[in-house]
Amino acid sequence: MTSTAPLDTSKWFVPIGPESFFGRTQIRPPSQALAVENGVIRLQLDTHNPDALVSGDSFWGSEIDTIDAYEVASGLSFSARVRFASGVPGGLVGSLFSFVFLPAIPGHDEIDFELLSNDVVAAEERVLTNVFDDDDFSQPGEKAFTQVVGLDLTAFHLYEIRWHSDRVEWYVDGNLVRTETDTVPNDPQNVRLNFWAPDEFFAEAYDATLVPAAAAGNNEVYFYEVDFVEIRRLFADIPTIGPIGFIALGILLALVGVVGVVGAAPGRGRRNFRRAPDSAK
């Protein structure tokens, strides 16, 4: 059974204004309730954008952002269990990332996991990661594809980013898939998830055959599902050199305090995405 529920606005917000349009996608406004099914939030993309300035010029996607911004400090881990719902066409992107706009450049710091529906269509077992440090928006970042044997983007997997002062690490289902030491952002960032359709400038993710629908009657709906998001503080930077380092880091993660835990299927020990009714507070 599918229900709708307001976003917990004590933890999350939906971007509005210029920040809510990128690629070929307008992010749906906060007034649009998010679909929730069995505790899983379903970020929705419609091929028809009812808010389009010109009918058929854009898609209608979804994004949720944490209100809090987090410093790297002694290290930060943020993770999400996500998947594309079955039936997605090529040309869509589902993301877990951190971001901050830096007006003085103007530019941004950013750390990304990006799942490409083009890889679903092509049966590719890979993920795209990227990182930006004080880059203007013309820069492509330090993007890299990593093969992950057996990865099915339409099945739930755990994607984790560990941001340290001297490196960024990306994990899939607890396995390290990339380490970056040359480009490491240092500005406080919030954590975001979104579902959108890029333009031709994001060539790896673009599909020219996916086009916006001018008429509401031709609308198609697709989903990027989020089981939970977890944000944890790492108390100290421990070099992950060899098996001993990884074991030590695993022990550390078990002991650290939780910065914020948001959204989960019931029984997973994490708060649900849907906001509790006033009577339950």
Image (cartoon, grey):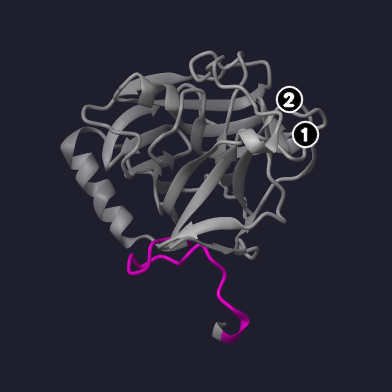
Given residues 159 and 30, the one toward you in this image is 30
Is residue 269 magenta-colored?
yes
CA gap between label 1 and label 2 equals: 7 Å
Main SS, magenta region, reads loop
Please give left or right for residue 94 compared with residue 189 in the image: left
Given residues 2 and 69, the one toward you in this image is 2
Q: What range is drawn magenta here?
A: 260-279
Q: Are marks 1 and 2 in contact (CB under 8 Å)?
A: yes
Please give left or right for residue 31 compared with residue 255 in the image: right
Type of amino acid at the residue the image marks with label 2: Asp
Q: Quadrant of the C terminus?
A: bottom right
Please give left or right for residue 1 compared with residue 253 in the image: right
Is residue 128 magenta-colored?
no
Where does label 2 land, which residue?
57
Where does label 1 land, which residue?
52
Q: Which residue is drawn at 61% across and 22% down?
A: 211
Q: Can residue 207 be seen in this view?
A: yes
Disc 2 element? loop
